[in-house]
Amino acid sequence: MPHISLRSLNVTYRDRRALRDITVDVPDAQITTIIGPSGCGKTSLLKSLNRLIDLSEEARVEGEVLIDGVNIYHPKADIIALRRKVGFLSQKPYPLPMSIYDNVTYGPRMHRMNREQIFQQIAELEKDRSLGRLCPESTRLTARTRRGGEMDLLVECYLRVAGLWDEVKDRLHDPATGLSVGQQQRLALARTLAVEPEVILADEPTSALDPISAKLIEEEFQFLKKKYTIVFVTHILRQARRIGDYVIFLYLGELVEHGPAQQVFTSPRDEKTRAYVAGDIS
Amino acid sequence: MRWRRIKDSLATRSMYLAVALANSIVFLVALGLFVKARPILATTSVVQLLFSSTWHPLRGQFGFYPFIVGTLAVTAIAMILAIPVCLLSAIYLSEYAHRRVRELVRPVIDLLAGIPSVIYGFWAVIVIVPLVRATGGALGSSTTGYSLLAGGIILAIMVFPIIISVSTEVLQTVPVEAREASLALGATRWETVKHVVVRSALRGIVASIVLGFSRAFGETMAVLMVVGNVPKVPTSLFDPAYPLPALIANNYGEMMSIPLYDSALMLAALVLLLVVAGFNLLAHFTLLRIERRS
Ligand SMILES: Nc1ncnc2c1ncn2[C@@H]1O[C@H](COP(=O)(O)OP(=O)(O)O)[C@@H](O)[C@H]1O
Ligand SMILES: [Mg+2]
């Protein structure tokens, strides 16, 4: 069973319908890109997958989103557990108003993870990476012997995963707001991964970044898809071609076409998709 | 082209002038008060004036200590009462209330801010003073109700509107991305408010409190109606007190034939000004400390 399936999902803001009757399954352990012109409902769709859309007071959601078979819009749904399972990377990174270090530990602290749970999580992270050890032996040794050392280990591991460690290792306790936007986005990624989600939602995560940071993030996602189900919103077609395994094409709030990237880009079934992929409409 | 440049420099200069004027008023006020207070400063030492508790204008004894303590005590009580209530209200309005509730509450708060001080005073005499009397009685201290506590309560109520509305606005300027970043990690709403929203808005919240209390220091009418106005250092919440603004308002223009009385009141005003300035400086440095820490 796929992690995520949408069943007749409708989203309206007051009287304006932003998404109409979306029914689609998101394949597991792949990168699914959501493409479509600006204002077509990509962000709304993404935010209805972890119920961040609840934050907009005008938004009304109808239909079902099943994650692991459970409808997340059921009145008794556990939203905290949902959001822990479904990570989110926003278009513009927002560093939490605290140090770099505390940004990474924020999730685990909120979930009251204890020392053993954190060591367990790091062990699994390294096993899945099949790259051997993420952190040098010395870090792991001090982590074992020092009080609070597990958090140091966690911070180092996830900053390494996000490709930020070398740039910030000497200023971990400085405010995160001092980082460049590209670094902030990688910090946001580290922060998201630190709660070990199963799904990662990314809303045009590279659009505010310089080309080099954008490339770093993109490569990171290629790597992450081995382990996570990824839904990646982009309005850059070339990016969707580069990283997407599966494509969902939205146009004016409607699901026009979805399928394997290969098929959608080379032989689209719908006229609108053809036009969009060819760059005739945008 | 030249004309545009002249206009630009004109605009810059007039803005500079406006700022300079606004800032110099503080010094002009202080200077004026100082000049008028000179006579009394010439007869008695500053230490004597500030730390003596004897207030006998007829005998030429002007000790401001009870009034300074009264001012600080009333303000402190008001602060202790107002800050938690205001912050919780602001957090509720900004983070929890539905937009319609917010829109409904806002005009009510604006109305509260607009009620003349004397009306608050009357209401306090009718409601708060008896309540304080009853409470004091129940706790075994006989009090008229005209007390430090009554003054503090009415002062707290009077600063509610400004602190609530300014901090609500400050909280609302925190971008929605801040809340999303925290909630998306599985934090609860309260955790998000506590660790992210309030922290992002801390500077503005402190500023709103400073704003409220700068006003509270000088708030006269309502406080003097319920605070008792006895020039003695209060030793309990139920004792009467006599803040500086009440002293000035009650006496200026009367008994001016007493030598140095006029000068003493000017000094009282100067002291009040310095207390407010000191409070502002303190707040300023607290803010700097908070910012350096985070
Ligand atoms: N909070 C909101 N309130 C009202 N309308 C909104 C809100 N968010 C999005 N919309 C509207 O919904 C439509 C889809 O927006 P969005 O999901 O942000 O599209 P995209 O991410 O593809 O640009 C747009 O027409 C937008 O104006
Ligand atoms: Mg968008």
Image (cartoon, rainbow, N blue to C red):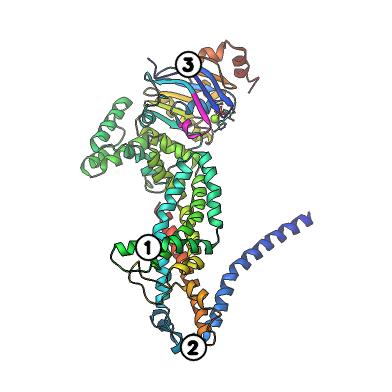
**Marks 1, 2 in one chain:** yes
Q: Which residue is mark 1?
A: B132
Residue shown at 27% from the left, 39% from the top: A150
Q: Chain letter for mark 1, please.
A: B
Q: Is residue B61 above or below residue A106?
A: below
Q: Is residue A53 magenta?
A: yes
Q: Is residue B27 magenta?
A: no
**Foreground: B73 or B158?**
B158
Q: Position of residue B273 (x, y in %)?
A: 50, 72
Q: Which residue is mark 3?
A: A24
Horizontal side of residue B18 vs A60, given as left or right: right
Q: Is mark 3 within 8 Å of ligand 1?
A: no
> Is any part of residue B5 visible from this angle?
yes
- Mark 3 is surrounded, within 10 Å at the Cα level, by few (under 14), some (14 to 19) or many (20 or more) other residues, namely some
* Magenta region: A52-61
Q: Which residue is mark 2?
A: B42
Horizontal side of residue A209 vs A186, given as left or right: right
Q: Secondary structure at mark 1?
A: helix
Residue shown at 30% from the left, 36% from the top: A135
- Mark 2 is surrounded, within 10 Å at the Cα level, by few (under 14), some (14 to 19) or many (20 or more) other residues, namely few
Residue type, mark 1 in image: Val
Residue type, mark 2 in image: Ala
Q: Position of residue A113 (x, y in %)?
A: 28, 36
Give the Cα separation between the discs numbered 3 and 1.
Answer: 66 Å
